[in-house]
Image (spheres, grey):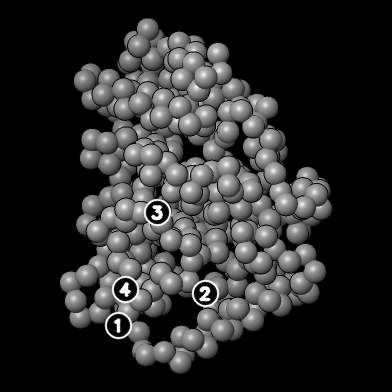
Amino acid sequence: MRLHDIEDFFDDESAYDDRRSRPRKPKRSENEAQDRAVPADLGDGVFDPQSPRSGRLTEAEKARLALVRESALAGPPLPPGADRWSTWGDGEQGPHPRPKWVVTELAAADSELGILKTGKEADVFLLERAVPDTDQGCLMAAKRYRSNEHRLFHRDAGYLEGRRMRRSREMRAIANRTSFGRNLIAEQWAVAEFAALSRLWSLGAPVPYPVQRSGTELLMEYLGDEDGMAAPRLAELRPDGDELLDLWHQLVDVLSLLASEGLTHGDLSAFNLLVHGTRLMLIDLPQIVDLVANPRGLEFLGRDVANVAAWFQARGLPEETANPMALTEELIATAGLD
């Protein structure tokens, strides 16, 4: 799967909190399913603008949710503690070769163990998928984009440049921030992030494996320990000496890999880099930028480098090592744009 096959990529701009203790079981409301619902999806992240609306849900989406509820009632009872049966067969699935830890059995059940991180645009939950009465199971991170009423759109215009939609009316709706346009953006964030993760994981980049996408929910590899403690963000750490230098070299390697594909993160900082064990991992990728197609591509690249270089310099890495100008020029050359 290639990123340019996806129609749009949009900014997540998640501002995660600092909670690193074992997550607590979240409280649920009767309207939680509706709070997370999106308009009628016609495939490829395209919504039906003619579908009659009532409140937050289109009639088609209401019908889809009704079918989900009927299926749950008609099926066998869930195992104790489970929240739903596996959605593996319902969504877009991750790239091959698929890691052995991924549970693909439709007989598996999903249990929500708590919230890992909260952000302006999405929340990330810890999810266990396991086959009842067996030892088959895995932990995953479930990233769920919120309903459009809660989203902020003040920074996404720059990421839209150089991108295509199938219909001009869709681009107008996005540009005018109509209700239809906001719904298009909401769905495309999940589509774009899944595509970005799929491509980069296939290239060997240090990103979590994208397990599946269903609507606005993205299931991916959980980066943390078995007790539910998530890997810390780089911004939470105070590495020094050899550890700091090693993390810088890892960062240069991943930026070089992206540049060789004509890409940059687009919103890179120490807040969307995780340190899993000793490995630096790149997260939050819905706004990934094509350096050629986006007229501001080199601007985004320079900003990405400046942000992370400033963080490393503030932690004591010499400026001659974490030199943003030199690294930016090197990445531009790697991308073949010098």
Residue tagged by mark 1?
80
Residue type at mark 1?
Pro
Q: Residues within 10 Å of mark 2 (few under 14, many from 20)?
A: few
User: In terms of sequence position, does the residue under pointer 1 or pointer 3 come before the other?
Assistant: 1
* Mark 4 in CB contact with mark 2 (< 8 angstroms): no
Residue 95 is marked as 3
Residue shown at 39%/78% (left/top)? 85
Residue tagged by mark 2?
29
Residue shown at 42%/12% (left/top)? 323
Residue type at mark 4?
Glu
Q: Quadrant of the C terminus?
A: top right
* Mark 4 in CB contact with mark 1 (< 8 angstroms): no
Which quadrant of the view contains residue 57?
Answer: bottom right
CA gap, disc 1 to disc 3?
Answer: 32 Å
Residue type at mark 2?
Ser
Q: Secondary structure at mark 2?
A: loop
- Outermost residue, left side: 135
CA gap, disc 4 to disc 3?
Answer: 17 Å
CA gap, disc 3 to disc 2?
Answer: 34 Å
Residue 187 is marked as none
